[in-house]
Amino acid sequence: MNMPNTNKTGSAPSSLARPSRRGLLAAGIAGTAGASALALWRRNLTARGIDEADYPELNEPKLAGASAHMIPNVPVTTHTGEEVMFYDDLVHDRVVTINFMSVRNDAVYPVIDNLVAVQKLLGQRVGKDVFMVSISTDPEHDQPEVLADFAKRKGAGPGWTFVTGGPREVDFLRSYLFASRPFLTGAPTQGRHGPCCSVGMVRYGNERLCHWASFPAKITPEFIALRFDWIGFRAGDAPRHA
């Protein structure tokens, strides 16, 4: 009979040890929280009058966090050409900013320059404690290579992702995040669409804590950077208030 390897004390190695009660309890809590978040995600679709069968691009989150019901999980393409899911890969368990832009409209309404200044103020926190996501409103023109060149010219660094996608996916993100729900924490509009402010506003939040807010895209970079102290720079931080 083959016996398991033992250490000097004669006990089985840690890889064969039974999981602790605390570990099992933590896993159970995490699983319950994920199931609850997923149930909330489904209820939110129903409340908004969205039938999953009508939106095959809208995917169920792999790991439903506290904000899964607020952020559409649709396929998009990054400026590096990578195919990702918006919620799963760019938002889940992160502190993020989300804004809309287009390369051709930047000369008319330059919001990226302001966010570049914010990136400089945050320094090495970008890509570590906070992530930035910019979504093109002109997906037919703003292909990955166009966004990559734009990001390089503007000085966008690691931790800042520019994304494009099919017109349907982009419209879904835009209406879900801005037109159909003026505030992420507000109630569904039951089919009524208000004016879209997606280009003039930036959403930001702590996904794990489901703590979200917004700010005008052109306010001073110093004030924007300060706002992250109010919600917590890292996913596990408790929100702070001004």
Image (cartoon, rainbow, N blue to C red):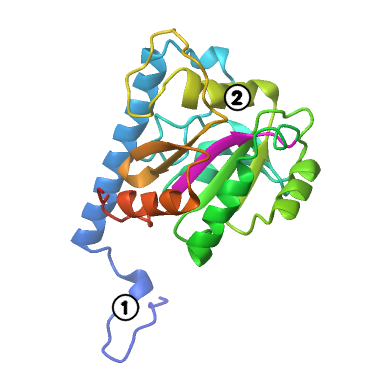
Above or below, 233 against 71 in this view is below
Provide the residue span drawn in magenta: 95-103
Residue 159: say if magenta.
no
What amino acid is labelled 2 in the image?
Glu
Q: Position of residue 38 (x, y in %)?
A: 37, 31
Q: Dot 1: what SS?
A: loop
**Cβ–Cβ below 8 Å for labels 1 and 2?**
no
Tell me if I can see residue 66 in this picture. no
Q: Residues within 10 Å of mark 2 (few under 14, many from 20)?
A: some
Q: Which mark is residue 12?
A: 1
Is 235 or 119 nearer to us in this picture? 119
User: Residues under labels 1 and 2: Cα distance?
Assistant: 48 Å
Tell me what residue is drawn at x 52 percent, y 54 percent: 118
Q: Which residue is mark 2?
A: 57
Left or right position of 27 against 148: left
Q: Position of residue 113 (x, y in %)?
A: 63, 48
